[in-house]
Image (spheres, helix red, strand yellow):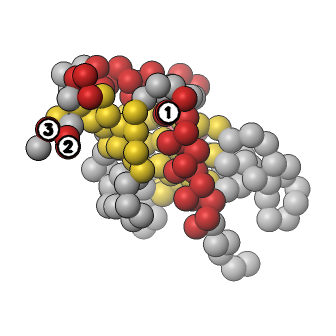
Amino acid sequence: MARMDTRLESEGAEFLVLGQLLIHKIAAYKTYTNMPGYDIVATNAEHSSSARIQVKSRWKTGANGFPIKNFECEFVVAVFLNRGSPDGKKLPMPPHYYVLPAATVQALRRSEGWGKVNLNHLPELEQYREAWGLISDFLMSSRANPSPLEC
C-alpha cells in the first residue's frame, strides 16, 4: 500500500494546537513552514518568556506513536487526529491532544531508523492529555527562555 499524503492534515494539526493555545489564553504564533525543531512559539510578554512547541500528528484513529528525532523545543504536542482508517474499519472521532515536555518524550524508548516513540510506554500518559497548563506554567517560571522580542 502506498504511503498516504497527510501534509494538509499535519498543517491542520498545527493550527488546531495554535487555536487550543489561544483559547487557553496562551499567546502563540505559528512559525514558518518546516522550521527545524519546532512549529509554534508560545510567549508571555509580562515575563519575557517563550516556549518552542513541536507538533506531531497522526491521521489514523487509534494511533499511539509518532516519529521524532529533533528535540530543539521545550514541548511536544502529540495530536491524534482520529480520522478513521484507510480500510474504513475505524471510524473518525474527535482529536486527542497530549502536551508533553520534550525531556519526557526524549526519555522514551525510540525505534531504530524512524525514531518512533510509542506513548503506550508512558504510564502516566493521561496526565498529559490536554495539559495546556504545563505550557502556561513553564512561561511563568524562570526555566522559560527569554522571549525573541527581547533581542
> What type is the residue that disc 2 sits on?
Pro
* Position of residue 19 measured from the top left corner of the image (x, y, whole percent): 55, 39
**32 left or right of 91?**
left
| Quadrant of residue 12 within the rendered picture | bottom right
From the image, tell me which residue sits under label 2: 148
Q: Nearer the viewer, residue 27 or 106?
A: 27
From the image, tell me which residue sits under label 3: 150
* Quadrant for the N terminus in the image: bottom right
What's the CA distance linking mark 1 and mark 3? 22 Å
**74 left or right of 1?**
left
* CB under 8 Å between discs 3 and 2: yes
* Quadrant for the C terminus in the image: top left
Q: Nearer the viewer, residue 112 or 91?
A: 91
Identify the residue at image location x=54%, y=49%. 15
Q: Which mark is residue 22?
A: 1
Identify the residue at image location x=84%, y=52%. 90
* Position of residue 21 measured from the top left corner of the image (x, y, whole percent): 49, 33
Residue neighbourhood size for the residue with mark 2, other residues' Cα within 10 Å, grouped as few (<14), some (14–19), many (≥20): few
Asked whether residue 111 appears in the rendered view, the answer is: no
Whether 11 is drawn above or below 3: the answer is: above
Q: Earlier in the sequence, mark 2 or mark 1?
A: 1
Identify the residue at image location x=22%, y=23%. 47
> What type is the residue that disc 3 sits on?
Glu
What's the CA distance linking mark 3 and mark 2? 5 Å
Residue neighbourhood size for the residue with mark 3, other residues' Cα within 10 Å, grouped as few (<14), some (14–19), many (≥20): few
| SS for dot 2 | helix
> What type is the residue that disc 1 sits on?
Leu
* Position of residue 133 measured from the top left corner of the image (x, y, whole percent): 45, 21
* Position of residue 122 measured from the top left corner of the image (x, y, whole percent): 51, 33
What's the CA distance linking mark 2 and mark 1? 19 Å
